[in-house]
Amino acid sequence: GNSVTQMEGPVTLSEEAFLTINCTYTATGYPSLFWYVQYPGEGLQLLLKATKADDKGSNKGFEATYRKETTSFHLEKGSVQVSDSAVYFCALRTLNAGNMLTFGGGTRLMVKP
Amino acid sequence: GAGVSQSPSNKVTEKGKDVELRCDPISGHTALYWYRQSLGQGLEFLIYFQGNSAPDKSGLPSDRFSAERTGGSVSTLTIQRTQQEDSAVYLCASSLEGTISYNEQFFGPGTRLTVL
């Protein structure tokens, strides 16, 4: 079956620090990969996605590269801001596993000024 | 345009009561999903509707849970004889054609269910 493993939080960083949130996956079939973000008091929203190997998804200064050889999709940002404080979820989807998203456990990021 | 809406936003109920949660997907989206988010289980899939096809119910945790989608639009998730372990945030999402894996799923704000 499909599964996603991401680093446990919370991750606490100072403003302008470099961020990495690790995500690895197992999948039956060829997955599309996603990062979702949940800001305090808000709903889940798509941050970025990648649909094939070596694709790089990017948005709002965040990036993640689809690495098939290491089954990873690590999220990075060069300089975090206080406004990036949120919970980040790595997820995948394969058509042969019912079309639903399979999520990792989420990583809470706290950025201090 | 309008996003996915859910009602109620909060629901407090007593153990053993039935509850209904409603989801209005984005107009034109043929795929609709229910997930729940709880402290112990994270985000987990419940059920998926695609057009007029039979729903994928593989994520429903017990036969107390059911869902329907009327007219290919609004969906209702029903939990019968609620238990305390049903307390969670229930999320609805919709997307264009669900059989395309990279189509974005748009999430609603969720319904927070508390079973006393």
Image (cartoon, helix red, strand yellow):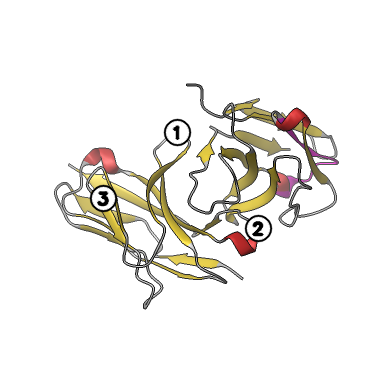
Which residue is found at the position 48% from the left and 44% from the top? Answer: B104
Q: Secondary structure at mark 1?
A: loop
Which residue position is annotated with label 3? A62
Element at label 3: strand
Residue type, numbered disc 3? Phe
Q: Write down the residue under mark 2.
A: A98
Residue A25 drawn above or below residue B15: below
Which amino acid is tagged 2? Gly
Q: Residues within 10 Å of mark 3 (few under 14, many from 20)?
A: some
Looking at this view, is B52 or B36 the one in front?
Answer: B52
Query: Residue A68: x, y in percent?
Result: 39, 73
Q: Earlier in the sequence, mark 2 or mark 3?
A: 3
* Chain containing the residue with disc 2: A
Horizontal relation, residue A9 to residue A91: left or right: left
Tag 3, which chain?
A
Q: Is residue A43 above or below residue A9?
A: above
Nearer the camera: disc 2 or disc 1: 2
